[in-house]
Amino acid sequence: MVGFPLFILAILAGVWVFRAEFLGFFRDREALRSWILAQGLVGMLAFVGLQTIQVVLFVLPGEVVQVAGGYAFGFWTATALSLSGITLGSVANFYVGRILGRPFVEGVFGAEKVARLEVATSSGRGAAGFFLFFLIPGIPKDALCYVAGMSRLSLPLFFAVSMAGRLPGILGSSFMGSASQNGSWKAALAVFGIAFLLFFLGLVFKERIEALVARATRKKS
């Protein structure tokens, strides 16, 4: 159980060393766009790596990275790159949860929270429960990957339900970045408003949503 904390510490050390560059990227989308485009393929790979790190260090704002990608690369390229990075990060989290198991997951997220998620995803329709959690805004999706790892969900099924659930949010974030870069501020703000409202509702009613998903997945299981 020592390897993963050391891995996280190594990433945090790298972020600290290059903190000025990272903060500059998050504060100035045009700087991020110019830097990435100047790097060509290396810039794309760097963005995928940044998106992967964001999923592993789930406290970082994933939507900011995705919006920045839409601004830098355009809608379709940013969507593909974000999906690639999120897939890598999600699979890493999944295997960490599977290898280190319940003690690690409960130590990170708390026994009560893990138990609530398990209630909604441990039935015969657990895959449907995970899909709904990945789909609903306001649910901590990156953290949910660890819980999925300690469940009975297979990796292929986890990949299918997690990516299908994440896709609408990734599309929306990439669109916001692309629209703002093209000067389509009304469209970007409209999508942002919808996303913010859904995120707020998901955050406020998170426990009720978890209970509803639990009841729904227990039916006819």
Image: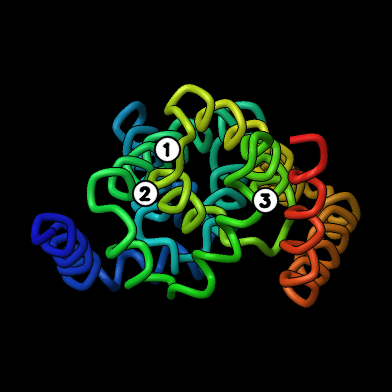
Number of marks in picture? 3
- Figure check: 46 above or below 118: above
In this image, 206 relative to 166: left or right? right
Rendered residue at 15%/57% (across/down):
7
Name the kind of residue labelled 1 in the image.
Gly
Spot occupied by residue 67 in the image (x, y as percentages of width and height): 61, 51
Spot occupied by residue 187 in the image (x, y as percentages of width and height): 88, 49
Structural crowding at the residue carrying mark 2, measured as other residues with C-alpha within 10 Å and reported as few (<14), some (14–19) or many (≥20): some
Circle 2 residue: 50
Q: Report if residue 36 is visible in the image.
A: no
Instruction: Determine whether label 2 and label 3 are within 8 Å by CB.
Output: no
Rendered residue at 62%/57% (across/down):
119
Helix, strand or loop for disc 1:
helix
Circle 3 residue: 133
C-alpha distance separating marks 2 and 3: 24 Å
- Outermost residue toward the top? 156
Rendered residue at 45%/28% (across/down):
154
C-alpha distance separating marks 1 and 3: 20 Å
C-alpha distance separating marks 2 and 1: 8 Å
- Residue nearer the viewer, 39 or 56: 56
Task: Name the image quarter holding the N terminus.
Answer: bottom left
Circle 1 residue: 85
Instruction: Determine whether label 1 and label 3 are within 8 Å by CB.
Output: no
Query: For residue 57, which quarter of the picture?
Result: bottom left
Task: Name the image quarter holding the C terminus.
Answer: top right
- Residue nearer the viewer, 9 or 38: 9
Rendered residue at 66%/31% (across/down):
164
Question: Which of the two marks, 1 or 3, is nearer to us in this view?
Answer: 3
Instruction: Determine whether label 2 and label 1 are within 8 Å by CB.
Output: yes
In this image, 182 relative to 84: left or right? right
